[in-house]
């Protein structure tokens, strides 16, 4: 079977990673995220994966969906990967609890 990695493939990966985050952050507060290093690492990993998949979407798809925050997705990934020790947990928490679920809703309408 031919596994073609196209926009559909990467969108499904993004949605899967976002759904994972939403599920596992549902009843988590900032203190729990801070205290649970496995959960925090898992959430950061998923955010990086979302960014990596988003980078592989075609320019045509991104242009057609320019309302989505492509630059912010890439920027957050770069902060996590290249400046891990200085990532503001409050921003990460807010992103996980608010921006990520909103992004899933936006993607459902593309």
Image (cartoon, rainbow, N blue to C red):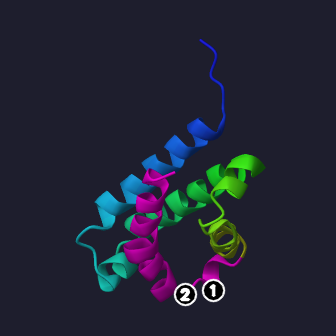
Classify 10 Å Cα crowding around label 2: few (below 14), some (14-19), many (20 and above): few
Residue 30: assigned label: none
Q: Quadrant of residue 100?
A: bottom left
Q: Residue furthest left?
A: 27
The Cα–Cα distance between marks 1 and 2, rounded to whole angstroms, is 6 Å
According to the picture, the residue beneath numbered tag 1 turns out to be 86
Q: 77 left or right of 105? A: right
Q: Nearer the viewer, mark 1 or mark 2?
A: 2
Give coordinates of residue 54: x percent, y percent.
64, 54
Secondary structure state at the residue bearing disc 1:
helix
Q: Is residue 73 magenta?
A: no
Classify 10 Å Cα crowding around label 1: few (below 14), some (14-19), many (20 and above): few
| Residue sitting at x 35%, y 72% | 36
Vertical placement of 88 versus 51: above or below?
below
Q: Residue furthest right?
A: 59
Vertical placement of 85 versus 81: above or below?
below
Highlighted magenta segment, given as a residue range: 83-110
Vertical placement of 86 versus 7: above or below?
below
Give coordinates of residue 71: x percent, y percent.
70, 70
Q: Is residue 104 magenta?
A: yes
Give coordinates of residue 80: x percent, y percent.
63, 72
Q: 40 left or right of 10? A: left
Q: Residue furthest front?
A: 64
Marks 1 and 2 close (CB-CB < 8 Å) = yes
Q: Quadrant of the N terminus?
A: top right
Secondary structure state at the residue bearing disc 2:
loop
| Residue sitting at x 46%, y 50% | 15
Secondary structure mostly taken by the magenta-highlighted segment of the chain: helix
Residue 88: assigned label: 2
Vertical placement of 25 versus 79: above or below?
above
């Amino acid at each position: 079977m031919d596994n073609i990695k196209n926009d559909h493939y990467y969108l499904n990966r993004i949605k899967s990673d976002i759904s994972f985050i939403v599920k596992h952050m549902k009843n988590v507060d900032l203190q729990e995220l801070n205290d649970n290093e496995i959960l925090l690492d898992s959430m950061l990993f998923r955010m990086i994966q979302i960014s990596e998949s988003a980078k592989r979407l075609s320019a045509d798809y991104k242009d057609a969906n320019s309302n989505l925050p492509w630059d912010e997705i890439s920027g957050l990934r770069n902060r996590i990967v290249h400046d891990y020790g200085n990532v503001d947990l409050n921003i990460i928490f807010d992103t996980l609890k608010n921006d990520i679920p909103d992004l899933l809703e936006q993607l459902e309408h593309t």
